[in-house]
Image (cartoon, coloured by chain):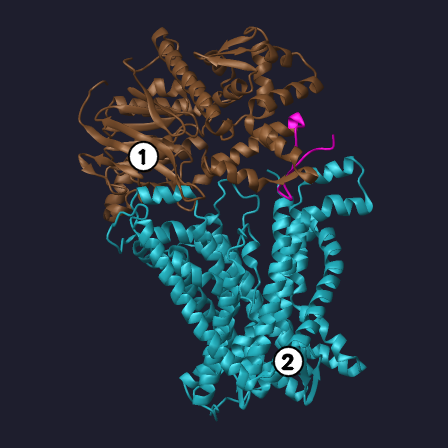
């Protein structure tokens, strides 16, 4: 399927910013040039916070970029257009409409007659394999069936371009696999009116399985860091050596990007504004123990652990990054190697673990050290959360700032570095 | 009056506006009321309504009276719905309109409903001189004020919290504003709107009864209805007739519930946003009848198809809108101009009000009104405390027994809906009979109708209390006072607060009719702000009615801001897991 045709959607020098509380713009996407060609499935791959979903919404005309232009079939795009349809991660079905009515909603804007609308909806339903479910309400359906409705509603408009925002990530592993295969079958057999697909995902294997081309995004702000072409013929086999090679390659691109971004952030503003990865203490300890144990013995390929743990964790990257940031392990070239401290941690009891964690938190997470220092200096040893929030919000988006504080609080509570009282929204030093 | 039912079902309660906006809105509301009241009074000074039908005390006349009363309720409901769809939509869609409309709504719902009546009745009467249509409209307007604010708030909050993915989906499918309204916004708002309508309807019965027979200055109005029937019965000291009225009203409420609300709630269940299946599906035999009977379905099919195609129509050019295209610079200038206009209007209104008040009122009046307010505040506080001590344990006991709760809950809801003012004559009769002190024994009347909100909210809270918590408490052998403090009270707290807010709001409202009552020629007054407003209404003294209403509104707003909202926010935060 490796035709290279005219671009159906083209992004030129697209930048996106969100407003900081101070009113200054905070960049989330910078200088994105991207062309979605006729006949291809293009994947957007990146960590959470790389702005990939924002990018997809800009391509669909749902969000207006801060600067730069989006072209759809050669003309500037000014809003949602006929011929572009979106499939959402959360399905975005109207709970109060039946399957049939939900699909028909896709056609409301076209002003078709009732009979025509029903005929087209019916044929989309047949194609997607929803026949028999027409009169069901979304809440009666399983996740997989709901997403099928999402697909039917998108293709009923006969779109030339299909934008898919992590369409399979809210589904369990088996269901996701079925839907992927079904979609690829329709695509390969040219049963869909669609000419090109743009798909956002954080699942590397999924991207390699489905896409003709993958763009890897870096974060803060999101840029296109690498482009990987996938020359494999469909249907692709995950066990193929060529398939594994590409997956490995992307893993090492992502790890080197992650390391670069961690390093870059630790240099900015004394490292205070580092976005912390979404990883709990339990996940961190769990991963350290897994790598310390057989068969990894202290060093593991990310691909290998991801495959081994797949059903439980669909995204290992944040946890791996947390290990790297805390220097319990070193992330390089797609593999994770425990440091000496990491090995000690794996074999220690709770008290010793807490001490180790506390030491590393103070040394390697400047934000934690900063909060602790402020608490030490203050009389009464307490400080309002909003103080640190506003410090972070000068450099991070609100959700990132909120999440980072939440994560550092979780880590610090475990390490008994400081306490947090949510009722008063105050950080405090614990009784020593 | 604020029933705050919007929070009963997961509504978001945020501190929406800084308080200076409340002040500004209060001034506006007061000014408008005053202008309407005094203006129309001058216009139509000696006003009387000819050909008012004599109210008959025969029980046979009651069914027709009840029907009239019910029709007024329906008309008000329709008006509230139209108001909700326009006012709330405007507030949610336009940032600048929102700045004015929402604080205004906040104040409007704190004004005692019968206060509106005193002012607006003359206005409506002057619109249709010598015609009963005027007082009819005034009565309908009074009921309207008891439900419209709540419904509008609920709808506004729903519009503001439309899930992002559905918003994006409807934009990506390029639905027009009209299609989006009917496909997305109204359905999403429906459960909250229905619940709020039902809650305010309960209050509505109270006000429909109170607004049918009123005396404002020289003007005496008796609209055919249950309220006038009771009023006549009081004149005649006819306790039997009051019994008949209570029976008729009970029947009307039951029928209304079965024919209108049960079907609506059963139908509205499909608009629940949660994707999980409900544990308890609301049922209604009327609704089932409609769905299952082919004949009825066919009869209504053309109607349904008409609605369907009306909501599918685009009714708009498909103008793609993404983001705001106007530069931030221009937007800021626009905001400044807008703020300027609001400020100028406010200053002008405030000065006019002050000028008016200086002529007619003295500082002494303010002192009297505030002192009466303090008395009523004390009453409300004590009554809520007493009701809490009585109904919380009862509610918990009932709520923890599902079989019992199933039976008690509808009864509590019925009692909350029943217009307690129908019972007032009975109480007054007893007070006179046993020669009791009115200033103490009239007080319970204020909470007679609204205490049930505490009961049924606590029952709901206790029934929803997770059984694994109870089992955990039992397995750790937590008993007695510790069980109450650490297990049950945190569990029912948000529900209790919701009930108490409604109960206290209702008590303030009821004070206007409860603190001053009569039985034949005998008049009893308990003192307090309600009695003050009632007295001034009867005398037709508009500036003092306005003063009384303003004091009451301020007290209600203050209680909400300083006590109930913080409590509710606390309850929300502390008792939520995750």
Near-viewer residue (A59 or A95): A59
Q: Colour of chain B?
A: cyan
Give the residue at x 69% y 50%: B399
In this orientation, does residue A158 appear?
Answer: no
Mark closer to the observer (1, 2): 1
Q: Which residues are magenta?
A: A414-432
In this orientation, does residue B272 appear?
Answer: yes
Which numbered dot is residue B532? 2
Is A13 displayed left or right of B281 in the figure?
left
Q: Chain of mark 1?
A: A
Q: Label 1 to label 2, Cα distance in Å?
A: 65 Å
Q: What element does badge 2 sit on?
A: helix
Instruction: Give residue B469's position: percent from left, percent from top.
Output: 70, 39
Badge 2 crowding class, 10 Å Cα cut-off, few under 14, some 14 to 19, many 20 or more, is many
Near-viewer residue (A131 or A86): A86
Q: Quadrant of residue A279?
A: top right
The residue to which callout 1 is attached is: A15
Badge 1 crowding class, 10 Å Cα cut-off, few under 14, some 14 to 19, many 20 or more, is many
In the rendered view of the protein, which quadrant contains the N terminus of chain B? bottom right
Relative height, residue A355 to residue A387 (above, below): above
Instruction: Give residue A400's position: percent from left, percent from top.
Output: 48, 34
Give the residue at x 75% y 60%: B390
Q: Are marks 1 and 2 on the same chain?
A: no
Query: Judging from the image, what is the letter of the chain drawn in brown?
Result: A
Q: Chain of mark 2?
A: B
């Amino acid at each position: 399927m490796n035709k290279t045709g005219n671009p159906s959607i083209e992004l030129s020098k697209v930048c996106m910013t969100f407003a900081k509380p101070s009113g200054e713009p905070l960049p989330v996407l910078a200088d994105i040039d991207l062309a979605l060609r006729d006949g291809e499935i293009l994947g957007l791959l990146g960590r959470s916070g790389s702005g990939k979903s924002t990018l997809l919404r800009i391509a669909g005309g749902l969000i207006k970029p801060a600067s730069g232009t989006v072209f759809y079939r050669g003309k500037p795009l000014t809003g949602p257009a006929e011929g572009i349809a979106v499939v959402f991660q959360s399905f975005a079905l109207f709970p109060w409409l039946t399957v049939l009515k939900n699909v028909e909603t896709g056609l409301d804007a076209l002003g078709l007659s009732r009979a025509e609308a029903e005929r087209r909806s019916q044929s989309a339903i047949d194609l997607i394999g929803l026949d028999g479910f027409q009169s069901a309400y979304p809440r009666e359906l399983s996740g997989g069936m709901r997403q099928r409705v999402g697909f039917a509603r998108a293709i009923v408009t006969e779109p030339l371009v299909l934008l898919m925002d992590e369409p399979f990530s809210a589904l369990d592993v088996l269901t996701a696999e079925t839907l992927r295969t079904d979609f690829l079958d329709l695509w390969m057999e040219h049963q869909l009116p669609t000419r090109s697909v743009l798909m956002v995902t954080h699942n590397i294997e999924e991207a390699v399985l489905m896409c003709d081309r993958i763009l890897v995004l870096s974060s803060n702000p999101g840029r296109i860091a690498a482009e990987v072409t996938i020359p494999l013929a469909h249907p692709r086999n995950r066990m193929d050596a060529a398939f594994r090679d590409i997956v490995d390659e992307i893993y090492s691109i992502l790890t080197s990007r992650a390391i670069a971004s961690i390093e870059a952030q630790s240099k900015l503003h004394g490292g205070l504004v580092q976005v912390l990865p979404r990883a709990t203490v339990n996940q961190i300890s769990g991963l350290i123990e897994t790598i310390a144990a057989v068969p990894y013995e202290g060093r593991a390929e990310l691909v290998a652990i991801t495959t081994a743990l797949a059903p439980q964790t669909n995204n290992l990257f944040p946890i791996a990054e947390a290990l790297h940031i805390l220097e319990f392990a070193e992330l390089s070239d797609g593999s994770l190697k425990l440091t000496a401290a990491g090995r000690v941690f794996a074999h220690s009891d709770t008290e010793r673990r807490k001490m180790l964690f506390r030491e590393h938190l103070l040394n390697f997470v400047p934000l934690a050290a900063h909060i602790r220092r402020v608490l030490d200096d203050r009389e009464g040893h307490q400080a309002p959360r909003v103080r640190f929030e506003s410090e972070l919000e000068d450099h991070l988006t609100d959700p990132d700032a909120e999440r980072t504080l939440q994560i550092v609080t979780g880590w610090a509570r475990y390490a008994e570095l400081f306490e947090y009282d949510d009722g008063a929204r105050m950080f405090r030093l614990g009784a020593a | 009056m604020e029933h705050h039912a919007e929070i009963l079902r997961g509504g978001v309660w945020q501190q929406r506006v800084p308080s200076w906006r409340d002040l500004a809105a209060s001034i506006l509301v007061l000014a408008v009321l005053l202008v309407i009241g005094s203006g129309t009074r001058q216009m139509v000074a000696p006003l009387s309504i000819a050909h008012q039908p004599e109210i008959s005390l025969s029980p046979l006349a009651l069914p027709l009276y009840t029907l009239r009363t019910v029709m007024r309720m329906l008309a008000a409901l329709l008006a509230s719905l139209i108001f909700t769809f326009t006012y709330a939509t405007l507030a949610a869609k336009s940032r600048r309109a929102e700045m004015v409309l929402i604080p205004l709504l906040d104040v409007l719902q704190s004004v005692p409903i019968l206060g509106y009546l005193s002012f607006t009745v003359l206005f409506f009467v002057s619109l249709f001189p010598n015609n009963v249509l005027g007082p009819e409209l005034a009565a309908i307007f009074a009921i309207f004020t008891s439900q419209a604010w709540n419904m509008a708030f609920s709808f506004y909050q729903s519009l503001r919290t439309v899930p992002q993915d559905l918003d994006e989906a409807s934009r990506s499918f390029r639905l027009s504003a009209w299609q989006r309204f009917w496909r997305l916004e109204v359905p999403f708002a429906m459960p909250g709107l229905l619940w709020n309508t039902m809650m305010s309807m309960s209050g509505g019965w109270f006000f429909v009864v109170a607004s049918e027979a009123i005396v404002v200055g020289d003007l005496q109005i008796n609209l055919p209805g249950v309220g006038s029937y009771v009023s006549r019965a009081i004149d005649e000291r006819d306790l039997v007739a009051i019994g008949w009225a209570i029976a008729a009203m009970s029947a009307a409420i039951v029928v209304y519930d079965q024919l209108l609300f049960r079907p609506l709630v059963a139908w509205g269940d499909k608009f629940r946003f949660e994707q999980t299946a409900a544990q308890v599906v609301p049922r209604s035999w009327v609704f089932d009848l409609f769905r299952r009977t082919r004949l009825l379905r066919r009869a209504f099919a053309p109607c349904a198809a008409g609605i369907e195609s009306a909501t599918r129509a685009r009714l708009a050019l498909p103008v793609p809108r993404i983001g705001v295209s106007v530069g931030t610079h221009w937007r800021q200038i626009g905001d400044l101009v807008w703020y300027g206009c609001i400020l100028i209007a406010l200053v002008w209104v405030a000065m006019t009000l002050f000028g008016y008040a200086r002529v007619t009122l003295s500082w002494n009046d303010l002192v009297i009104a505030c002192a009466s307010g303090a008395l009523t505040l004390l009453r409300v506080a004590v009554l809520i405390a007493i009701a809490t001590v009585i109904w919380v344990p009862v509610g918990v006991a009932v709520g923890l027994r599902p079989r019992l709760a199933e039976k008690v809950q509808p009864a509590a809801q019925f009692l909350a809906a029943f217009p307690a003012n129908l019972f007032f004559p009975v109480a007054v009769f007893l007070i006179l009979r046993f020669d009791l002190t009115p200033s103490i024994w009239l007080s319970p009347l204020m909470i007679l109708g609204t205490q049930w909100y505490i009961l049924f909210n606590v029952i709901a809270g206790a029934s929803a209390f997770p059984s694994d918590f109870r089992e955990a408490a039992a397995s750790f052998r937590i008993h007695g006072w510790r069980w109450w403090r650490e297990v049950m009270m945190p569990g029912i707290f948000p529900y209790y607060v919701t009930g108490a807010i409604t109960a206290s709001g209702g008590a303030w409202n009821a004070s206007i009719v409860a603190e001053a009552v009569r039985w034949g020629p005998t008049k009893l007054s308990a003192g307090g702000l309600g009695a003050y407003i009632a007295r001034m209404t009867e005398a037709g003294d508009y500036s003092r009615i306005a003063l009384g209403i303003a004091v009451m509104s301020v007290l209600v707003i203050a209680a909400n801001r300083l006590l109930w909202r913080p409590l509710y926010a606390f309850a929300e935060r502390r008792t939520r897991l995750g």
